[in-house]
Amino acid sequence: MTPPNSETLEGLTQRYVLAAKDGDAAEFARLYEHIAPAVFTWANLRLRPEQKAVLDPTDLVQEVWLRAWRKIEAFDAERIPFRFWVFRIAKNVALEASRQARKPDRGRQPGGDSDPLDAIADSITGVSARVARDESLARFQAAVLELPEDERKLVIHCGLEGLPLREVGDRLNISEEAAGKRWQRLRQRLQTGELPAHLLDIGS
């Protein structure tokens, strides 16, 4: 997915995270923008209809952005990959959407008490709008939805969430080695230069 000479997401993390920890919201915005397409795609593939009724995928992108920014001081780039950390936040947001969907009053979306980031509000809105309009992402999502269930799970867990292959293998009841080989073959089939460079995790 990523051209051989392009910078990896974790390389970008090292460049921007120190500035973000010092309170530079613009630098964090540049970092998050690289993973926003993956978060949006994940939301479209994982959120059930009842969850989408209370949390649109574009809103999830913005909510995860806000929460990640508020927690950035606790992020340790040497201990955990940025992608894994962001998707852990995304899963919590989706879980809250599930709980909200079961409530009689479903008007309030998860995370409504988040502090607005006025300095980068336009960036947040702009990025989520761009990923929602990205036709290559729509085509990719349609292609993934046509895959067998096990292959869809490989895309979600290996490609988008960046889970360790051992954990993915446990979820699919296959070995770590088998998970790695299947994901490598599937990634080659899905590869296209139209997709955002950091949409899929290439480290799996």
Image (cartoon, helix red, strand yellow):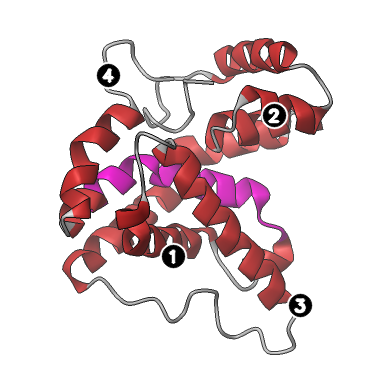
Please state the horizontal and vertical placement of residue 26, each as a whole percent of the image.
17, 55
Badge 4 or badge 2: first in the primary sequence? 4
Q: Is residue 151 magenta?
A: no
User: Which quadrant would the C terminus be assigned to in this image?
Assistant: top right
Residue type, label 3: Arg
Q: Which residue is mark 3?
A: 102
Badge 4 or badge 1: first in the primary sequence? 4
Q: Which residue is mark 1?
A: 63
Residue 23: tell me if it is visible. Answer: yes
Residue 148: tell me if it is visible. Answer: no
Residue drawn at x 60%, y 12% is 184
Residue drawn at x 34%, y 15% is 3
Q: Quadrant of residue 7?
A: top left
Give the total number of marks visible in the rendering. Answer: 4
Residue type, label 1: Glu
Q: Which type of secondary structure does the marked residue at label 3 adopt?
A: loop
Q: Tell me the distance, in whole angstroms, between the alpha carbons under discs 4 and 2.
A: 27 Å
Q: Which residue is mark 2?
A: 168
Residue 6: give its label.
4
Range of residues picked out in magenta: 29-48
Q: In terms of depth relative to the viewer, which is nearer, 164 or 34?
A: 164
38 vs 15, left or right, is: right
29 vs 57, left or right, is: left
Badge 3 or badge 4: first in the primary sequence? 4
Q: Tell me the distance, in whole angstroms, between the alpha carbons under discs 1 and 2.
A: 26 Å
Q: Tell me the distance, in whole angstroms, between the alpha carbons under discs 4 and 1.
A: 28 Å
Q: Is residue 180 above or below residue 15?
A: above
Badge 1 or badge 2: first in the primary sequence? 1
Q: Tell me the distance, in whole angstroms, between the alpha carbons under discs 3 and 4.
A: 44 Å
Look at the numbered discs 3 and 2 and tell me whether their residues touch, using CB distance below 8 Å. no
